[in-house]
Image (cartoon, grey):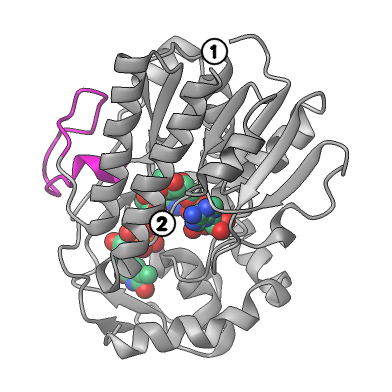
């Protein structure tokens, strides 16, 4: 598309959405960003604080609110859709908000994009493809069949299907990206890496699910943001792009790296109850994105990225302290 001038970023006060907003503010100061965010437990306006007021505007609202979308969307030339309920463990405890935000919310946004002929980029996850065995030489590609395992990933898969149908049936100018596990500053402390870092900072022992051998394919969230910008501005409409940085690591290796960096012993953690339906391994082949759009990850040194992430949580305790007790109480009630 031509360079967008006026974009809506849904979920722009969450972990990855706010990273994208900060990226656009820094790299594309000519682009105006309207952040649409409901400010759920996972959304924090602090994540976009300090950005130029004439460039970034926050609208607090729900993506399921059709009337609000009808007022907000006209005059914008693209919607970049990050808003979601994003945590697998929460989806197992209570799937309903996932159906509402991830499925109905995406439907409402697609309808608004259709009515006002607005370019649409949908942020999705590698979890729609299900999982791989540890010894499987395969990685996920754009052709891998959908096979989601959890309430979370099945609602994300549903939302992807809606985007594909709205493109094919109504001609909505849509693209989809499916990214692997993100890490970096501003990630909610319910998620694996920040949970363990903040546990150690609070004198709580880190918690590892199952046998700890599950593999995730880690990418720094800044590399994700650049990929989304490239797809939005240079990607082919109607296409899906997988985003990954060749970062496969077992959970126990990641946890031991955190323990070592924070001066704790290699076995200074608790084994806890496994997640029901726990996906074994994710792995992304991002050849299409690299070949077609020339994207490359910049944060290729995981140790360096982890050091910076640990430093950020250590220096920003005001950002997460208030949520810690409640987050851990929820896990404790489930034996995790
Ligand atoms: P997050 O939970 O940190 O943030 C979600 C944001 O969406 C919050 O600001 C929240 O307030 C907002 N939101 C939730 N429901 C809303 C609603 N009904 N209306 C408006 N706003 C609402 O999530 P995240 O980890 O930043 O993930 C962002 C997106 O990226 C999601 O679509 C997720 O599926 C996808 N994704 C995440 C990862 C990962 O590793 N975290 C990997 C691949 C894809
Ligand atoms: O305390 C923990 N101990 C543990 O062993 C937690 C919170 C998690 N885990 C394990 C479960 C997973 O194998 O660590 C791995 C990562 O867990 P999460 O951070 O919950 O991420 P995951 O379930 O892999 O999903 C993430 O990546 C894909 C995001 O939360 C999703 O939004 C994204 O789509």
Magenta stretch bounds: 126-146
* Coordinates of residue 74 in the picture (x, y in percent): 65, 26
Using residue 94 as the reference point, say whether residue 314 is left or right of it: right
Q: Examine the rendered structure and indicate whether residue 247 appears above or below residue 24.
A: below
Is residue 138 found inside the magenta-colored segment of the image? yes
| Secondary structure category for the residue under label 2 | loop
Q: Examine the rendered structure and indicate whether residue 43 appears above or below residue 175.
A: below
Mark 2–mark 1 distance (CA, rounded to whole Å): 27 Å
Q: Residue at x 34, y 69 (%)?
A: 90
Say which residue label 1 marks: 234
Q: Residue at x 24, y 58 (%)?
A: 151
Q: Which quarter of the picture shows residue 97?
A: bottom left
Q: How many C-alpha atoms fall within 10 Å of the one at disc 2: few (<14), some, or many (≥20)?
A: some
Is residue 59 found inside the magenta-colored segment of the image? no
The quadrant the C terminus occupies is bottom left
Earlier along the polypeptide chain: callout 2 or callout 1? 2
Q: Examine the rendered structure and indicate whether residue 273 appears above or below residue 275.
A: below
């Amino acid at each position: 598309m031509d360079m967008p001038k006026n974009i809506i970023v849904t979920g722009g006060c969450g972990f990855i959405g706010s990273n994208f907003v900060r990226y656009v503010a820094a790299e594309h100061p000519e682009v105006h960003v309207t952040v649409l965010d409901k400010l759920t437990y996972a959304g924090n306006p602090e994540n976009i604080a300090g950005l130029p007021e004439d460039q970034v505007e926050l609208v607090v609202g729900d993506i399921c609110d059709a009337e609000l979308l009808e007022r907000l969307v006209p005059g914008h030339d693209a919607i970049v859709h990050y808003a979601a309920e994003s945590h697998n463990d929460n989806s197992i405890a209570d799937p309903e908000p996932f159906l509402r935000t991830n499925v109905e919310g995406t439907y409402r946004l697609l309808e608004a994009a259709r009515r006002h002929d607005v370019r649409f980029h949908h942020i999705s996850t590698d979890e729609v493809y299900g999982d791989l065995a540890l010894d499987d030489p395969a990685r996920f590609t754009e052709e891998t069949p959908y096979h989601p395992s959890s309430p979370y990933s099945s609602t994300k898969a549903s939302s992807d299907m809606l985007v594909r149908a709205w493109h094919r049936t109504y001609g909505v100018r849509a693209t989809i990206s499916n990214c692997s596990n993100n890490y970096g500053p501003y990630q909610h402390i319910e998620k694996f890496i920040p949970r363990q870092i903040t546990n150690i900072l609070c004198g709580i022992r880190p918690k590892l699910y199952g046998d700890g051998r599950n593999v995730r394919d880690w990418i720094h969230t800044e590399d994700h943001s650049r990929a989304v910008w490239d797809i939005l501005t240079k990607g082919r409409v109607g296409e899906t792009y997988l985003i990954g940085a060749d970062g496969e690591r077992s959970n126990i290796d990641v946890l031991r790296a955190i323990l070592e960096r924070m001066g704790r012993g290699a076995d200074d953690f608790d084994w806890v109850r496994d997640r029901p339906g726990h996906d074994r391994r994710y792995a992304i082949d991002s050849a299409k994105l690299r070949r077609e759009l020339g994207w490359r990850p910049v944060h290729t040194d995981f140790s360096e990225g982890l050091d910076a992430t640990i430093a950020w949580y250590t220096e920003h305790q005001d950002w997460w302290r208030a949520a810690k007790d409640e987050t851990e109480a929820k896990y404790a009630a489930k034996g995790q």
